[in-house]
Structures are given as C-alpha cells and as structure tokens.
C-alpha cells in the first residue's frame, strides 16, 4: 500500500506456499505491471526441472506455463539474481533467460532470451549465443525493448565483463551496447533513461544513463568491495 506516493508496509500475506515435500524452490519473482492481469510470475526449481509459473496476486494455486528438463536446459536466474524474468508492459508476455545445462563446457554453453505468451507458447528467441545473459527488464508503454546485461561465459565472475545492452523484442533484433560495467538496469517512466548498478570495484554505486545520448549521472557511491544493486524508479 502507499500514502501520498510513499510505499508503506502492511500486513504480509502468503501468495503461494510450497513445503519441503513439494521440492519446489522459488528463485525469481516478477509482478505483472497491468492491474487487470493481477498475476505474479516466478521461476520454480525442482530436482528435475525448472519452470515458469504464474499465480494470482491475491493468492491461489500456481500454474506452470513453461518448463525445461535440467538435463537439457536451465532457466537461468543469472549470476546476479536480478530480474531474469520480466513481463511485457501490456501483461501479455514474459521474457527470461534459458541456457545450456551446467554440464555443457563453457566454450559450448549457449544463453538465449526466450519470450513466451501467458499461455506458455514460445513467441521468439533473442540474442542466442555463447555469452552469459541476465538482469532482464522490459521497457514501459511506448517502447518494446528489453534491457539486459551480457558477459563472456568464460569470465562471468569478473566484474568489468558485465555490460549493459538493449534489445528489441522482435525476431532478428540486434542487441545495442549501452554501457560497460553496468548491470541490473531499470527503465525510467518515459523509457529515456536506465538506472543501473555501476559494477566496478573502483566506484560501485547507482547511476543513470540517457539511452539515446549515452550521458551518465552518478547518483550514489558506496564503500570499496560492495555493489549497490536493484535501484528502481518511482512510477507515475
């Protein structure tokens, strides 16, 4: 709930609940931006498969709409588990990262952005290749693009390898480089800027970038060895 535009805490409620006997782990969640849809999507992991589920925001039984067997593929929450599951701005589609299983050698492992509709039907595959992907964030109304980070699979633990890209959601779209050493991006309300984590050991913190001009503004910095992740914009 909110008061005068400021978020306030209220009584917590359980949306869905799994027990140890269910063997389901929830790793990433995303709330649909369309109030009439009123659903939450999440990635659920079992010992044999990983799936995309949706559940009413008022609570209820989750519905699995897409899944892969862990022996052939994985749905990847990302090395930095931020937003590797995102809704389209009209609430009709979901995007997430799918990858080859961990048993695949680094030099052969493929990552791709999958786009499905809310029935789980595959719509398109974006940016498929031998590079790690994560931090997906779909743009707001008026634009149809996804912000994400990319990094070389062989060096995905090196902070300077994480770079921010934007890609259109139509088949064949080419990812556009936006900023080096940047992750966990969030769109401004009018899609003109991206708020991101400045992912460097020298000056970690939160900054923003004008998507068209590339002009950046530092908003905060924190002590060496830490990273300021998961900032977001207040929506109108």
Image (cartoon, rainbow, N blue to C red):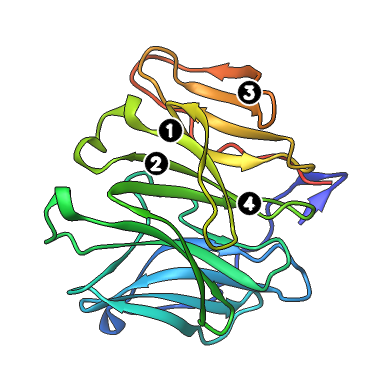
Q: Tell me the crowding category of disc 3: few under 14, some 14 to 19, or many 20 or more residues within 10 angstroms, Cα based.
A: few
Marks 4/3: CA distance? Answer: 17 Å
Q: Which residue is mark 1?
A: 163
Residue 138 sits above or below residue 40 on the image: above
Q: Position of residue 205 (x, y in %)?
A: 50, 22
**Is 217 left or right of 201, judged from the image as shown?**
right
Q: Position of residue 74 (x, y in %)?
A: 28, 66
**Label 4: which residue?**
145
Instruction: Check disc 2 and report its element: helix, strand or loop.
Output: strand
Q: Are marks 3 and 1 in contact (CB under 8 Å)?
A: no
Element type where label 3 sits in the image:
loop
Decide: few, some or many residues near mark 4? Use Cα within 10 Å; few <14, some 14-19, many ≥20: many
Question: Is residue 236 rendered to the left or right of residue 158?
Answer: right
Q: Earlier in the sequence, mark 4 or mark 3?
A: 4
| Residue assigned mark 2 | 150
Instruction: Locate residue 49 relative to residue 120 in the image: left or right.
Output: left
Sequence order check, earlier mark of 1 and 4: 4
Write the residue at 32% across / 47% down.
132
Dot 2 and dot 1 residues touching (CB under 8 Å): yes
Q: Which residue is mark 3?
A: 214
Mark 2 to mark 1: distance in Å?
Answer: 5 Å
Work out whether residue 148 can be spotted: yes
């Amino acid at each position: 709930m909110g008061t005068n535009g400021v978020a306030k805490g209220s009584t917590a409620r359980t949306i869905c609940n799994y027990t140890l006997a269910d063997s389901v782990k929830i790793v990433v969640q995303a709330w649909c931006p369309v109030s009439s849809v009123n659903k939450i999507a999440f990635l659920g992991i079992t010992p044999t498969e990983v799936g995309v589920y949706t559940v009413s925001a008022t609570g209820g039984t989750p519905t699995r709409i897409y899944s892969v067997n862990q022996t052939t593929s994985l749905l990847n929450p990302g090395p930095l588990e931020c937003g590797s599951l995102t809704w389209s701005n009209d609430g009709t589609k979901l995007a997430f990262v799918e990858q080859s299983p961990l048993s695949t050698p680094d030099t052969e492992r493929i990552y791709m952005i999958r786009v499905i509709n809310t029935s789980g039907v595959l719509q398109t595959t974006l940016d498929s290749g031998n590079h790690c992907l994560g931090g997906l964030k779909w743009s707001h109304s008026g634009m149809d693009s996804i912000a994400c980070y990319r990094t070389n699979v062989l060096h995905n633990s090196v902070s300077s390898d994480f770079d921010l890209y934007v890609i259109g959601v139509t088949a064949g779209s080419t990812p556009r480089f936006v900023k080096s050493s940047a992750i966990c991006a969030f769109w401004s309300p009018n899609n003109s800027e991206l708020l991101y984590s400045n992912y460097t050991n020298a000056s970690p913190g939160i900054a923003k970038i004008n998507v068209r001009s590339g002009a950046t503004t530092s908003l905060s910095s924190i002590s060496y060895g830490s990273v300021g992740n998961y900032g977001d914009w207040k929506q109108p």
